[in-house]
């Protein structure tokens, strides 16, 4: 029979807003191996770029629900206004 894997419950939480980059998160492998760090921002950027979402999404449309906090909404509107100037 194969080795039995022992599951250790561990959680990782990281809060962020739309103004923050996605975090790098640790992925546990085995007890003998160090955790693997996954850069979620790099993963997101790669998928976004390869999928050409910047060409497919109409950023002039209102944001879908849920509504953002007022500070986040203002930040998005400012970011989109700068993008229109390009």
Image: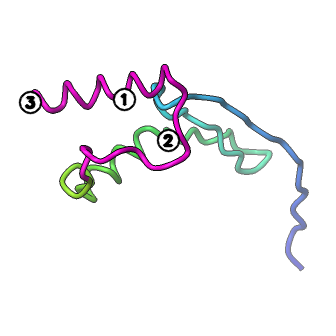
Task: Return the x and y of residue 38 as percentages of the image width and height.
Answer: 54, 42
Q: What stretch is highlighted in magenta?
A: 58-86
Task: Return the x and y of residue 75 as percentages of the image width and height.
Answer: 38, 22
Other-residue count near label 1 (Cα within 10 Å), few / some / many at <14 / 14–19 / ≥20: some
Depicted 50 relative to depicted 69: above or below:
below
Q: Quadrant of residue 47?
A: bottom left
Whether residues under marks 3 and 2 lie with C-beta atoms below 8 angstroms apart, the answer is no
Task: Return the x and y of residue 48 as percentages of the image width and height.
Answer: 32, 51
Marks 1 and 3: which is nearer the front?
1
Left or right, 49 with respect to 47, comes to left
Residue 55 lies within the magenta run: no
Disc 2 designates what residue?
Answer: 40
Q: Quadrant of residue 19?
A: top left
At horizontal 35% and vertical 43% (from top left) the residue drawn is 45
User: Mark 1 or mark 3: which comes first in sequence?
Assistant: 1
User: Mark 3 or mark 2: which comes first in sequence?
Assistant: 2
Numbered disc 1: secondary structure: helix
Q: In which quarter of the image is residue 17?
A: top right
At horizontal 58% and vertical 28% (from top left) the residue drawn is 16
Disc 3 designates what residue?
Answer: 86
Q: In which quarter of the image is the C terminus?
A: top left
Whether residues under marks 2 and 1 lie with C-beta atoms below 8 angstroms apart, the answer is no
Q: Which of 24 and 17 is in front in this view?
A: 17
Disc 1 designates what residue?
Answer: 76
Left or right, 42 with respect to 35, comes to left
Gap between marks 1 and 3, in whole Å? Answer: 16 Å
Other-residue count near label 2 (Cα within 10 Å), few / some / many at <14 / 14–19 / ≥20: some
Q: Tell me the number on the disc at residue 13.
A: none
Marks 3 and 2: which is nearer the front?
3
User: Mark 2 or mark 1: which comes first in sequence?
Assistant: 2
Gap between marks 2 and 1, in whole Å? Answer: 21 Å
């Amino acid at each position: 029979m194969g080795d039995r894997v022992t599951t250790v419950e561990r959680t990782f939480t990281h809060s962020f807003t739309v103004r923050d980059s996605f975090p790098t998160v640790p992925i546990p492998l085995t007890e003998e191996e160090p955790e693997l760090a996954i850069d979620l921002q790099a993963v997101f950027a790669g998928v976004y770029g390869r999928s050409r979402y910047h060409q497919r999404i109409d950023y002039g449309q209102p944001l879908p629900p849920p509504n953002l906090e007022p500070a986040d909404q203002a930040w998005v509107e400012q970011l989109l206004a700068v993008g229109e100037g390009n």
